[in-house]
Structure formats: C-alpha cells, structure tokens
Amino acid sequence: MLKAKLKSLPVERMRGEVRPPGDKSISHRALILGSLCQGRVEISGLAQGADVRATAWCLARLGVDLQLDGCDALINGQGLGGFRQPDSALDCGNSGTTLRLLSGLVAGARITTTLGGDKSLQKRPMGRISAPLRKMGALIGGPQDGTRAPLYIECRGVRPRLHRLEIASAQVKSMILIAGGFAHGLTQVEEPAPTRDHTERMLCFLGADLCTEFPRVSLRGPLDLGPAALRVPGDPSSAAFLCAAAPFIRRSRVVVRDLCLNPTRTGFLEVLRNMGARFETQNLRDVDGEPVGDLVMRYGALRGCTILGRLVPRTIDELVVLALIASMARGETVIKDAAELRHKESDRIAGTVDAINALGGSAEATDDGMLIHGLDGPLLGGTIRSRGDHRLALAALAIGAVTQRGVSVEGAEAIAVSYPEFVQQFNSLGGSIQ
C-alpha cells in the first residue's frame, strides 16, 4: 500500500529503461468497447490504477462477463444486447472517464440507473454530457439539473443526430459515439479542435462503419463487432513523469519502451522540443491501430515557451508536470486556453501555481492558465499537498529528483488512481522516492 506521505530526494543520475503502465484512456475504451463485441475479447497491457478498475467493476454490474487478472482481461461479449439492469447505483469512484463514457453505454442499452462517485467526481462538470444525451432522447436527472453527479439516466432508445461540441472533449465525443453505436442511422460529432482519437481508432480496428474527416466524426449504427484481441500500449501521460527529471541531469538517458505515440497524445513532446529538450523516438510500429514506439530522453538545457490553442487539448494531462519543468527553465512560460484544468480532480491551475511557489519558484495563476517565471536552475524544494489529485502528486515527486532539498508530498496515495507502480519504476531509473 502506498504511503500517505512520500519524499523524492535529489539525485545525480537518471538512466535506464522502463515500460510504463498501459495507457489509461485506451484501457477504459478497450473494456467498454470490448463489452459491445459479440464473442471472446482478450485484452492485454491494461493500466492497473483505481480508475480502470472502476470501469471494469461497473461493466460487471451491468452484466458483462468480464474476468480481470492484473494487466489482462477476458470478456465474453454478448453484443449490444448483452447488458442487464444493475441492482443499485454504479460507483465510478474518482474516474470521470468511467462516468462519462458509461453514460453513453447505459443510455444506448436502455438501462435505467444512477452513476455516481466520490466527492471529487461530484464537483466535476457533467452538463457537457447531459445536454447531448437529452438531444438523443435520454432523460437525465441529478444535482443542478443534471450538471453534477450523481446522474440518473433513463432512455427508451437513442436517436442518431449531428452534435456540434462547444468545448473540445474526447470524453464527450466518445460518449456520443458509444451511445450512437446502439442507434439505427448516422451519429456525427463535430469538435472545435482535435482531441485524442482512441475511440475512433479502436472502433475502426474492431470493424465499425466509421469515418473521420476533421472536424467531423461519423458512425453508422447499430454496431456489429466481432471477437478481437486488443493490446494496450504504454501511457504517454505516465511517460511524462518518468522523463521529467532527465533534461536537467547531465549524461542522463531514460528509455521508455512500447509507448503510445498517437499524435493527439504527444503534445508534451512537442512542448519539450520547443523548450530545447533532446529526445528521439525509435522502433516505430502500429499496434492494433495505434502508433507505438520507444522514447529516448536525454539532458538538454531548457527555455520557456508558450502553450495555447490547439496544443492544449493534446497536453491537458501533462500541463501540471510541464509547468513544474518550466519553473526551472530559462525565461517565462505562458499557458493559456487551459481553463479546463480548473475542473479536473482538483483546480489544477491553483494547485500547480501554489506548488511552484511553495517549492521556491515563481508562478501566477490566470483565469485560463498560468504565467511561470523560470529560475534557470533547480527549485529549492519543500512540502506540498496533493489535494487528492494524482497528477499533482506525480509531478511533484518527479521534479523532486532535481530540486536542491527534495520534495515531500502529503496525500501521495492519490497516485494509485492512475500510476500505482510509479515509485518502483521511477526509482529503477535512478530516482530516490522514500
């Protein structure tokens, strides 16, 4: 069991090879889309965090014949008609992905139920999924007119239609496509900016009639998906934490194997390149519709940069660690168009700015981002609170390796949500988290 308080000490060496946990976003989708298939679905490489377990638990409550064994899962799918009414509400824990994607499934499957979660999840915005589901024919109830969890969903059948999203969101897009998979006809989604496309790639791999031509995704239902074997590649968001210290340590060489290099997920590499980081990708290949390869990160003097516009959705899960990295770079870093960070597991703008300042850096919060004044040198170090947010805890522990005095994180057990193996893997590369 993870400690409630962990300390990451400064180190002089970061070298080695590691395979990060399976991609969390793809893991959720593999379980959910796998449950829509008719026949045997074998999944390997799943992320083992609490969020993915919540998705598996909810699917089992919905009648899916699912066996979970560590990183592997076996689903004996019954197609679109293989779901049953749960005998109580579905507990999604801390996982917004679980609640949002399964909302589409239960609406499409004509299941009446309530989807809830912990106190953090109950604060996150749900109006963005309630609105399109209502347009598809679902009855939605819940706090603040169904804009907060727990959500009550009742539907007698979804209608295919065109949805124009005001906010770029892969979760909302995926929820609509999953619900639309039960409808007879064409379900279409237009998004204002490109977002991660794992749902589209996996549906195509499984044989769905789907067409993508930005800004529109079109899916013809109902789905008729057969047996399959799915391999989940390494999580790029987890890789960002493994690589965070390497650019600051001379002669460092961190190799991350079997990494998902989907262009919608590699924005953090684009930012690091703009900052002057030295890295390369090797052994590029296709794994079940996803581009995969190895990442080699080395030492390189970093400078500040600007992150805004369409780059933000591609870095949304890495902005916290990128901000901490920027606090030690040369010059200013500006992050804009990232108001979505205020609606994650915590207010990540406030939490990140407070962490940087508490550790001896200089940062200011704005309405939709941050202004970071780089030190061109290591942070002093100190103690921060995780605020129950796994990304903030992971980022602080990663950066602790290149501070002067190290970083203590209170509430460090939060990392179990997405990356319970982090301490072991980071220490195997030369880190010192105790």
Image (cartoon, helix red, strand yellow):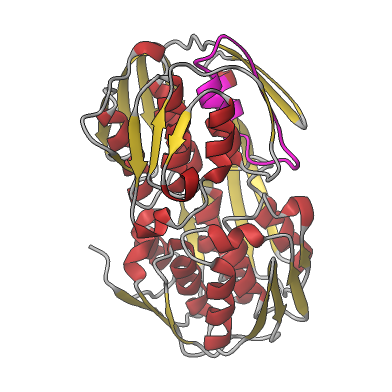
How many numbered marks appear? Answer: 0
Taking 415 as reference, is 179 above or below it? above
Taking 156 as reference, is 239 above or below it? below
Q: Is residue 266 magenta?
A: no
Residue depicted at x 28% and y 37%: 57
Q: Nearer the viewer, residue 65 or 327?
A: 65
Residue 321's x, y, as percent? 57, 67
- The part of the image, by quadrant, that contains residue 99 is top left
94 relative to 206 in the view: left or right = left
- The part of the image, by quadrant, that contains residue 110 is top left
Quadrant into which the C terminus falls: bottom left
Q: Nearer the viewer, residue 362 or 340?
A: 340
Instruction: Answer whether residue 38 is visible to the viewer in this image.
Output: no
Q: Nearer the viewer, residue 33 or 403?
A: 33
Taking 343 as reference, is 56 above or below it? above
Instruction: Answer whether residue 11 is visible to the viewer in this image.
Output: yes
Residue depicted at x 54% and y 30%: 134
The span shown in magenta is 176-203
Residue 430's x, y, as percent? 44, 70
Residue depicted at x 35% and y 70%: 412
Quadrant into which the N terminus falls: bottom left
Residue 41's x, y, as percent? 37, 19
174 relative to 98 in the view: left or right = right
Residue depicted at x 72% and y 75%: 301
Q: Nearer the viewer, residue 412 or 292?
A: 412
189 relative to 429 in the view: left or right = right
Q: Is residue 191 magenta?
A: yes
Residue 265's x, y, as percent? 63, 46
Which residue in the rendered view is the most extreme toward the front? 145
